[in-house]
Image (cartoon, rainbow, N blue to C red):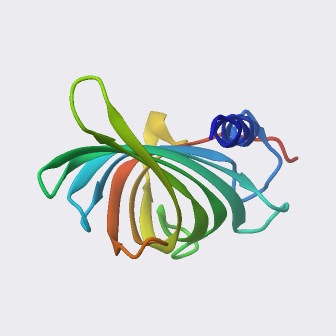
Amino acid sequence: MYTRKLWFLVLFVWLLPGDALAHRHRADVFVSYSLLKSSDFDGLSLQGSWPIAKEREFSWIGSFSRYSGEDEGKDFTLLAYSGGLRYRARIYTYTRWFVVGQLWIGAVDTIEKLDASTSRHRTDWIAGGGPGIEFRLGGDFQRWSLRLQTDLVHRFNGKTGPAFSIGFAWEGRDLTP
């Protein structure tokens, strides 16, 4: 379990957008509030992306999320790790609106709190994807965007449901001439 978490942390740090080498799609970091409707969990997500090739709209993504909530009267904490592919394109040529779509696969650690000192742990595979929309802010905040993302999340233990995220994305520098 700890090896997977360490691998994911190394991957995520590699994805941080210090200097992106893409022309139109730069690397970014997305921080959001998320809501899982299948079980009424909410929490925070941190997602990073790195462009696959110069002048392309596709990028690799890596994500870490922490959710908490109750299900059937029991307290749970979910830690989700995922990676995948994102497509992002401008809706019109001279606008600040973008359409976003992503597909990903990963794992979720479910921690059930039994009492003050004990808990039960289980790991499941997850996969999902969905559309989103992004609005680039202007003025002094040109690298910032407001993003609304929806995903259909499937846990391989049988649960499937929608997830909603809203937050801010920050784009790295463009180093191309």
Q: Can you name the residue that lies furthest to the left here?
A: 73
Image coordinates of residue 132 in percent, x first then y, are: 43, 69
Q: In this view, does 92 lie above or below 177?
A: below
Image coordinates of residue 113 in percent, x first then y, are: 27, 37
Image coordinates of residue 143 in percent, x first then y, are: 55, 42
Q: Which of 5 and 49 is in front in this view?
A: 5
Residue 44 seen by the camera: no
Q: Nearer the viewer, residue 101 or 153?
A: 153
- Lateral position of residue 155 relative to residue 52, left or right: left
Q: Residue at x 53, y 76 (%)?
A: 92
Residue 48 seen by the camera: yes
Q: Which of 106 and 88 is in front in this view?
A: 106
Q: In this view, does 91 lie above or below 54?
A: below
Residue 12 figure quarter: top right
Q: Can you name the residue that lies furthest to the right here?
A: 177
Image coordinates of residue 144 in percent, x first then y, are: 48, 43
Q: Which of 167 and 61 is in front in this view?
A: 61
Q: Is residue 23 above or below residue 114?
A: below
Indicate the quadrant containing the N terminus: top left, top right, bottom left or bottom right.
top right
Q: Which residue is drawn at 60% across and 65% down?
A: 105
- Lateral position of residue 21 relative to residue 32, left or right: right
Q: Residue at x 77, y 68 (%)?
A: 56
Q: How many numbered marks does the figure carry?
A: 0
